[in-house]
Image: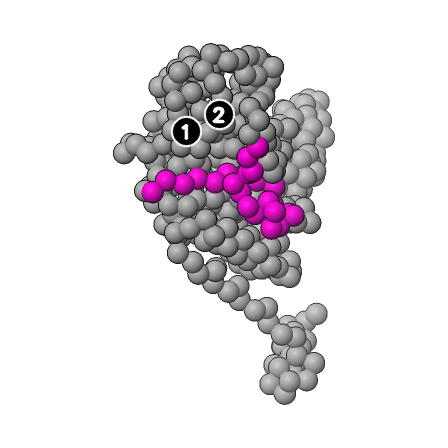
Amino acid sequence: MTFAQKIQVLAASLICAGSGLNAVAAPLPIPEPPDFVASSYMLMDYHSGQILAAHDPDKRVEPASITKLMTAYIVFDVLKKGEVKPDDLVTVSEKAWKAIGSRMFIEVGNQVPVSELLQGMIVQSGNDASIALAEHVAGGENSFAGWMNQYAERLGMLNTQYQNATGLPDDNHYSTAADIALLARSLITEFPEHYKLYSQKDYSYNGIKQPNRNRLLWRDSSVDGMKTGFTDAAGYCLVSSAERDGMRLIAVVLGTPSDKARISSSEALLNYGFRFFETLRVAGKGQPMAQARVWKGATEQLDLGTARAVYVTIPRGRKDGLQLKPDLPGRVIAPVLSGQSVGKLQISHEGKVLRSEPLAALNDVPLGGLLQRLADEVMLFFKR
């Protein structure tokens, strides 16, 4: 289409828009997130990691029993490494037995399998179970808390500090909505086989049946986790996750005034995210996304792709604004090894850069023969 033809098309579209005939409606802007009372909150897309809504996400607050997400993360990790077994018997200490607050009701001196303590901690939010697990894994709760801080640093939770495995109040025990969302995402990604515990609606131990305090599990079938928390200082908190049509969201709501408020606020955030956004996989692991010219190699073309599946989250119904653009180095010289970094894939939507993902060689390109190398050397000389 010539420039003049483009101008004619544009003029025609403006006339149609002005007359209301055959006009294509511009996409509506995304509305503001739901309004509710909370110390802080964050809504994150699980696959892309993009933040869809937030209020004071870096504000340091008391996390209460949300702390047990990190306690579980560490236990899941040592289970994965084989350092602890699900059927290992844990002898209940007096400290664990005397734990205040929510409890699993384990008895001092009894031996309880790790698998049951996990259910007591995750489903029943048992402080006694949390302490028993911490003591079994690290030898003591204080040692375990130090380990929690090391794990937090490794995960990039820069505004979090733990003093215990339960979330009981302490002036130096704090976290943020942003850090908690990061932890929740990592837990789901790294331990999918254990994540299913968070959807368990009740658990019985010692003749006492207790329901999961996350009432969203009953209200919304797409919700399958994660953890509630409450102290007088922290208020009512909830980390929730839900999946609909392959799109998963994580909502962190901290410091609401009531149990009802944390449920309704979390539900409103999740519905907002699913209603107004969609997540697309724009590149598969190892899928060719670009080609680079290779000089002095046995072959001239090199396929490039990403080392992992890449997702982006955009306003629903606005896929046309998505653009993928390779950003490659000026010259790629053989030899090239598979997996070697070669440029980046820039992903933008409607002119805004969403992310830049490293591109890597999908195959080896060894050095070419002597004649090929000499010919390319001459061509490169004239390209200076």
Task: Give the residue displayed 56% in from the left and 43% down from the top.
Answer: 241
Of residues 119 and 339, the one drawn nearer to the viewer in this rendering? 119
CA distance for labels 1 and 2 = 15 Å
Q: Residue 342: x, y in percent?
A: 58, 34
Task: Give the residue displayed 64% in from the left and 61% down from the top.
Answer: 317
Q: Quadrant of residue 301?
A: top right
Q: Residue 127: x, y in percent?
A: 44, 28
In the rendered image, residue 225 lying in the magenta stretch gets the answer yes
Quickly name the residue at label 1. Answer: 166
Relative to 384, 196 lies left or right: right
Disc 1 crowd, CA 10 A, few/some/many (<14, 14-19, 20+): many
Q: Amino acid at mark 2?
A: Phe
Placement of 114 over or under 71, stated as above or below: above
Placement of 238 over or under 271, stated as above or below: above
Q: Secondary structure at mark 2?
A: loop
Asked if residue 15 can be seen in this view, the reply is no
> What residue range appears in magenta?
209-232
Task: Give the residue displayed 39% in from the left and 56% down from the top.
Answer: 37
In the current view of this chain or complex, which residue is farthest to the bottom?
A: 19
Disc 2 crowd, CA 10 A, few/some/many (<14, 14-19, 20+): many
Quickly name the residue at label 2. Answer: 105
Q: Which mark is first along the chain, 2 or 1? A: 2
Task: Give the residue displayed 72% in from the left and 30% down from the top.
Answer: 299
Which is in the foreground here, disc 1 or disc 2?
2
Q: Amino acid at mark 1?
A: Thr
Q: Residue 222: x, y in percent?
A: 64, 47
What colouring does the structure picture have? Answer: one colour
Asked if residue 221 can be seen in this view, the reply is yes
Of residues 25 and 251, the one drawn nearer to the viewer in this rendering? 251
